[in-house]
Image (cartoon, rainbow, N blue to C red):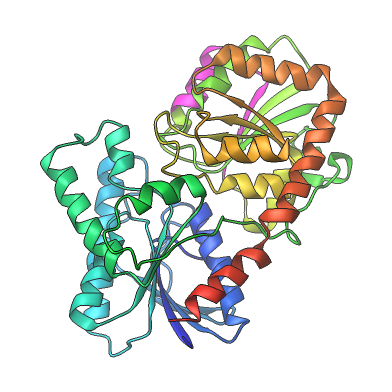
Amino acid sequence: MAERLVLLTQYFYPEMAATAQLLTDLAVELTKRNMAIAAYAAQPTYHYRDRLSSREIYQGVHIRRLFSTRFGKRSQFGRLADGLSFCLAVFFCLSFSRDRAPLLIVSNPPFLGWVGWLAGVLLRRKYVLLVHDVYPDVAIRLGYLKERGLVARIWRALNRRMYSRAAAVIVLGERVKQVVEQHIENSATPVEVIHNWADGQFIMPRCKEENWFAQEHGLTGKTVVLYSGNLGLFHDLETLIEAAERLKMRDDIVFLFIGEGGKKEKLMQMAQERGLENVKFLPYQPREYLPYSLTAGDISVVTLERGTEGLCTPSKLYAYLAAGQAILALVGENSEIADILEECGCGLRVDQGDITGAVDALKRWLNEPALLEKMKASARRCFERRFTLEQAVDRYYEILSRL
């Protein structure tokens, strides 16, 4: 049984990124089950700009923050530099460590798994891969790499070795599993599906009239369309601004964006140029505010870049479900999110860029408040049935304790 585990993740506490919060939850819960956890992470880039201590213990988890560049996610160059420098720092630390505990490796950055493969070959370290986004497939779908190009072929060759040597591969959904299994040559490598989660005791439905955050920001008495998280370059958020313009004559709806990211300035400029008083922007909120900021909405938005269906699943979905929010999904029909909405009856799906479809969906909720309330209740039931923190940790512990 694995009594110790080393977690490799670029983002960790106190980072505000969803990946950081999820992996922090997981590490803390595993320590409660008497598994000693050490986390190798980068210095924060989302919310904290000051360099934090290189070593810290947080709720029993031993954190080691490694040196890496800190350009952030506003440019592709910055993301690449931060990811590569962190991978080099991890490899250096593993090479000079006497610790031989198994590794849990998160695919952020996407080439971090290669470090685990090298550690397996050179140092005989066992490792489990946690795949959030399937690369190079995502880069190919977005047009950054050619399907048959040299970089893509080398990347896939390295991935085949990385996957085949892993003790297990964990993915976030059945559609992602189908893609990953095509890249694995060793049929003995198990691919396990464990969805992301939210803490249902921390985030739960809350009446806006009893929500100080909603009151403070003038959100009571209105239907609030909420997007909370990374305002990233690859999220279809312009559709929301266009929808807000078409609905600007209605005084019963507000569009609220909470977060930072490479697209925030563009979105703010679009709203300003159109004179949209029904659009609000707020910065990232402290973690302790999440039970109130997430429940200040009624309809929460999840987006995927066109073509990336089956390759990634936005983790914000699970927090929205925990908060009892109806879901407006700007995604293709062949996606894990579309499957969940259809199975649970907790939201509506619209193709990316379909402004008319988004407006029609929002008008339907505005004109049928009973339907909106029904979907909000269905969202929480769906969460409790399938996506709680306890359910996810049970599965992780089952897999990791076998190492």
Q: Position of residue 139 (x, y in %)?
A: 29, 39
Q: Which residues are magenta?
A: 266-284
Query: Per the image, is 275 magenta?
Result: yes
Tell me if I can see residue 127 in this picture: yes
Left or right of 32 on screen, residue 57:
left
Identify which residue, 144 or 60, lies in the foreground: 144
Q: How many marks?
A: 0
Q: Is residue 41 above or below residue 292?
A: below
Which residue is found at the position 32% from the left and 87% from the top?
A: 100
Q: Residue furthest front?
A: 187
Tell me if I can see residue 276 in this picture: no
Asked which quadrant contains residue 288, the reply is bottom right
Assign the C terminus to one quadrant of the image. Answer: bottom left
Q: Is residue 188 above or below residue 63?
A: above
Query: Per the image, is 197 magenta?
Result: no
Q: Is residue 356 above or below residue 205?
A: above
Asked which quadrant contains residue 387, the reply is bottom right
Which residue is found at the position 73% from the left and 54% from the top?
A: 385
Left or right of 301 on screen, residue 43:
left
Q: Position of residue 359 (x, y in %)?
A: 65, 15
Q: Position of residue 270 (x, y in %)?
A: 50, 18
Left or right of 380 on screen, residue 69:
left
Which residue is found at the position 29% from the left and 68% from the top?
A: 67
